[in-house]
Amino acid sequence: MTEPTPAVWVIVPTYDEAENIRPITAAILGSLPAATILVVDDGSPDGTGQIADELAASDPRIRVRHRTAKQGLGRAYLDGFGIALDGGATVVAQMDADFSHDPAVLPALVAPIEAGEADLVIGSRYTHGGGVVDWGIGRRLISRGGSLFARIVLGLRPSDLTGGFKAWRSSTLAAVPFDGIHAGGYVFQIEMTYRASRAGARIREVPITFRDRRVGQSKMSRRIVVEALVVVVQLRLDELVGWVGRRRRAR
């Protein structure tokens, strides 16, 4: 068996993913055999955490972080990021457990960071060569419209700001202040990229094809979308207020 190395960690948050956790971990290790997978389970009532423990017991490349309750995707990722950074990761990837993010793309996300060409790589549905399948027109409009709205309001360059398939240089991730980051799905992804961009991170997009989850139900809700729009505006307002304050102090 391949011995685990701390260089590349893949963070996989789970909640009720009992049907997916075995095949997704196998697929991730098939693409990155030397990676460490950290499953962050939010107390799944369907037994996902117990299955993850069984996998970890048989393969040292798999680790499990148990959380007592569902606290939001962002909180699960931040918890996992902290563990990976403390574990000596040099690259930290993040992805869903439901196969909407293709594990075969992981090497393409990690490569620009290992080559010193990028600090954050986004698996992008909306850059040239990317796409979405199995979505209705409504969800397509919400997702693409949310990214466009955030790009305009926050002045960001990446075309896909709401996606969660990413790879980070560990030093870039460690420089992002986790305190105050919002926990919701869409807004968490937007805010993390926003903060990395403002810190000067080199951001690259790699095209991906996003497929709707194989089994189970989508965890996206109207509340998550509304929260994202509100927080995007608040981030920009806070930035403008800070800019005005600095101008006044400089006089």
Image (tube, rainbow, N blue to C red):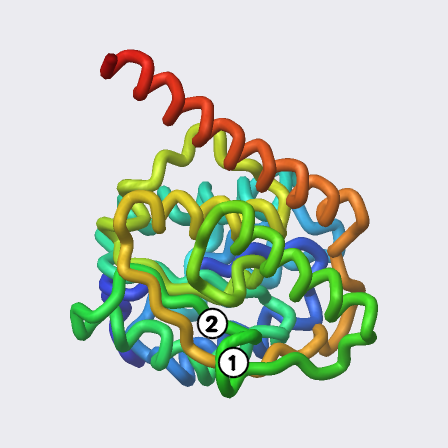
How far across and down, in percent of the image, does residue 31 sit?
40, 83
Quarter of image, res 82: top left
Mark 1 lies on a secondary structure that is loop
From the viewer's side, name the closer residue of 185 and 205.
205
Q: For this view, does 81 lie left or right of residue 209?
A: left
Q: Amino acid at mark 2?
A: Gly
- Residue at the disc numbered 1: 208
How far across and down, in percent of the image, does residue 34 sit?
29, 75
From the viewer's side, name the closer residue of 115 and 97.
115
Residue drawn at 21 percent across, 70 percent down = 117
| Residue 9 visible in image | no
Badge 1, how many Cα within 10 Å: few under 14, some, many 20+? many
- Residue at the disc numbered 2: 123
Quarter of image, res 211: bottom right
Quarter of the image with the N terminus is bottom left
Residue drawn at 79 percent across, 51 percent down = 221
Quarter of the image with the C terminus is top left
How far across and down, in percent of the image, does residue 33 sit?
33, 79
Q: Are marks 2 and 1 in contact (CB under 8 Å)?
A: yes
Badge 2, how many Cα within 10 Å: few under 14, some, many 20+? many
| Residue 47 visible in image | yes
In this rendering, the answer to whether 21 lies above or below 206 is: above
